[in-house]
Image: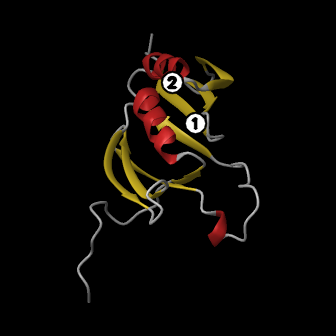
């Protein structure tokens, strides 16, 4: 049996397909404090074949879109999935993401379930929620 080559444990990880992988990584660094752990370029030297980022301690995987491997045409827009960030300070994470270029989908506010929570859309079409428990008063 071959030795595992991954430095992340078995689990479920978001894998984002984007148009403009380098720009996406730069955005996630600015917006969410991402740390790029690994990046492998495709044979064309321009597109990202695979990258691993660490956001708030968790692995997020990313690649450029490769229409030649999915039958061509435009890349479908992301839909039906929200990537949630459970953070220590929702307002800080929120401001940083909006300043980096995320657009507001649902305003950040104190919610009835006890979190400060809101939703953003990144420039690549992915929805992110940011939440943190509200202080007990």
- Farthest residue to the right: give it: 73
Give the mark, 1 or 2, whose residue is nearer the N terminus: 2
Disc assigned to residue 97: 2
- Relative depth, front residue between 43 and 49: 43
- Residue 25 falls left or right of residue 67: left
- Residue 6 falls left or right of residue 46: left
Q: Is residue 49 visible?
A: yes
60 in relation to 29, above or below: below
Instruction: Name which residue lies at 63% across and 22% down.
Output: 112
Can you give x and y, in whole percent of width and height, for residue 125 in the image?
66, 40
63 in relation to 21, above or below: below
- Farthest residue to the bottom: give it: 1
* Neighbourhood count class around disc 1 (C-alpha, 10 Å): few under 14, some 14–19, many 20 upward: many
Disc assigned to residue 128: 1
Can you give x and y, in whole percent of width and height, for residue 116 in the image?
54, 21
Quick one: quadrant of the C terminus? top left
- Residue 114 falls left or right of residue 50: right
Can you give x and y, in whole percent of width and height, for residue 14 in the image?
51, 53
Q: Is residue 115 visible?
A: no
Secondary structure type for disc 1: strand
């Amino acid at each position: 049996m071959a030795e595992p080559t991954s430095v992340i444990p078995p689990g479920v990880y978001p894998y984002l397909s984007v148009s403009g992988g380098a720009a996406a990584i730069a955005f996630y660094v600015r917006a969410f404090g991402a740390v790029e752990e690994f990046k492998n370029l495709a044979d064309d030297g321009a597109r990202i074949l695979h990258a691993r980022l660490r956001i708030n301690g968790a692995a997020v995987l990313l690649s450029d879109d490769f229409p030649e491997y999915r039958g061509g045409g435009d890349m479908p827009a992301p839909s039906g999935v929200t990537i949630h960030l459970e953070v220590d300070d929702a307002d800080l994470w929120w401001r940083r993401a909006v300043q980096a270029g995320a657009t507001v989908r649902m305003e950040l506010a104190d919610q009835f379930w006890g979190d400060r929570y809101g939703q953003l859309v990144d420039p690549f079409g992915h929805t992110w929620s940011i939440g943190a428990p509200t202080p007990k008063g």
